[in-house]
């Protein structure tokens, strides 16, 4: 038996196909050590060398050195995504402050890019406190919210801006939220096994939803629609163009969250 392959995976519904593939489609002599975390934590575990592979939010790619992008799989969307939203009681042009969900730096960077280049507004930004999404918003305040907790907040606000949809309207390109990265000690054999397991899960989304039906944050039918009609897993040329543009726009922010990605891909 070979050593364990240590993997960090985002703990949201959108990664269910990946999780299902890792749990049921993993083959080879390596054992599997799996951690489920919020996106921001996936970066830290990879930087500290605590995992070999991680699903990394793209705004953090510039921090990573001696890492490689692996697989042609990602978390992306061409238009509406449903789980990365700016919520408010007023139009975005009237907002003076936006509270930022700290769980994903990509979404934090995206809302700032859209404010600067798409909506052309300059609100103040402040970190959303723990469980702050349960607090009332003033008319001139907005709240960036991501992940599973969005499902329980829809319908309570007069304005719900889907950030992937707004990015599409602004650029005409898909948006990439996260990509798979390998640490410097990761093996190509492990990367190949990971790629196969992830693809195995993506090819069996309906099966994965059925298997997890009692543990889903939303109804089974809604989860299936979300995973097949909103989330896109193939990192194609259009998504790479969108990712490149996003990286360049991050660099134009007053306080860039991450410089351009210099990571090189494994040849799988």
Image (cartoon, grey):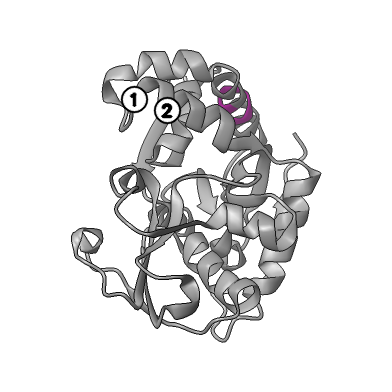
Residue at 47 percent across and 37 percent down: it is 14
Q: Which residue is mark 1?
A: 219
What is the spatial separation of the Cα atoms under label 1 and label 2, in whole angstroms?
6 Å
Could you say whether the residue bearing mark 1 is in a helix, strand or loop?
loop
Secondary element at image label 2: helix
**Residue 179, position in %: x, y?**
60, 47
Q: Residue at x 36, y 64 (%)?
A: 102
Q: In this view of the protein, can residue 3 be seen by the observer?
A: no
Q: Residue at x 53, y 57 (%)?
A: 163
Q: Position of residue 169 (x, y in %)?
A: 68, 58
Q: Position of residue 95 (x, y in %)?
A: 41, 78
Identify the residue at the far right of this view.
237
Tell me which secondary structure the magenta stretch mostly adopts. Answer: helix
Residue under circle 2? 223
Q: Residues within 10 Å of mark 1 (few under 14, many from 20)?
A: few
Magenta region includes residue 172:
no
Front residue of 35/99: it is: 99
Q: Is residue 226 left or right of residue 193?
A: left
Q: Looking at the picture, how far across and down is residue 268, in whole percent? A: 75, 34
Identify which residue is drawn at 58% across, 24% down.
202
Give, as a single range, the part of the protein colored magenta.
Answer: 194-198
Contact between labelled residues 2 and 1, with CB atoms less than 8 Å apart: yes
Pick whichever, 111 or 12, lies toward us.
111
């Amino acid at each position: 038996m070979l050593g364990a392959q240590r993997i960090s995976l985002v703990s949201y519904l959108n990664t269910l196909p990946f999780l299902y593939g890792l749990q049921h489609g993993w083959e080879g002599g390596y054992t599997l050590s799996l951690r489920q975390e919020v996106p921001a934590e996936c970066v830290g575990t990879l930087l500290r060398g605590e995992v070999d592979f991680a699903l990394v939010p793209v705004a953090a790619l510039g921090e990573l050195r001696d890492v490689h992008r692996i697989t042609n799989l990602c978390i992306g969307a061409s238009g509406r995504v449903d789980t990365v939203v700016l919520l408010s009681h007023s139009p975005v042009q009237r907002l003076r402050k936006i509270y930022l969900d700290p769980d994903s730096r990509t979404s934090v960077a995206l809302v700032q890019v859209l404010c600067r280049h798409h909506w052309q507004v300059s609100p103040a930004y402040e970190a959303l406190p723990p469980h702050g999404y349960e607090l009332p918003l003033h008319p001139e305040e907005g709240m960036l919210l991501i992940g599973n907790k969005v499902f329980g907040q829809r319908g309570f606000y007069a304005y719900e801006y889907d950030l992937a949809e707004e990015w599409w309207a602004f650029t005409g390109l898909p948006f990439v939220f996260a990509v798979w990265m390998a640490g410097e000690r990761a093996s190509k054999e492990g990367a190949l096994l990971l790629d196969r397991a992830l693809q195995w899960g993506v090819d069996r989304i309906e099966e994965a939803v059925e298997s997890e039906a009692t543990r889903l944050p939303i109804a089974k039918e809604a989860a299936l629609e979300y995973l097949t009609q909103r989330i896109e897993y193939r990192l194609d040329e259009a998504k790479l163009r969108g990712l490149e543009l996003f990286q360049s726009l991050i660099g134009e922010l007053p306080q860039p969250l991450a410089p351009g990605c210099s990571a090189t891909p494994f040849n799988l």
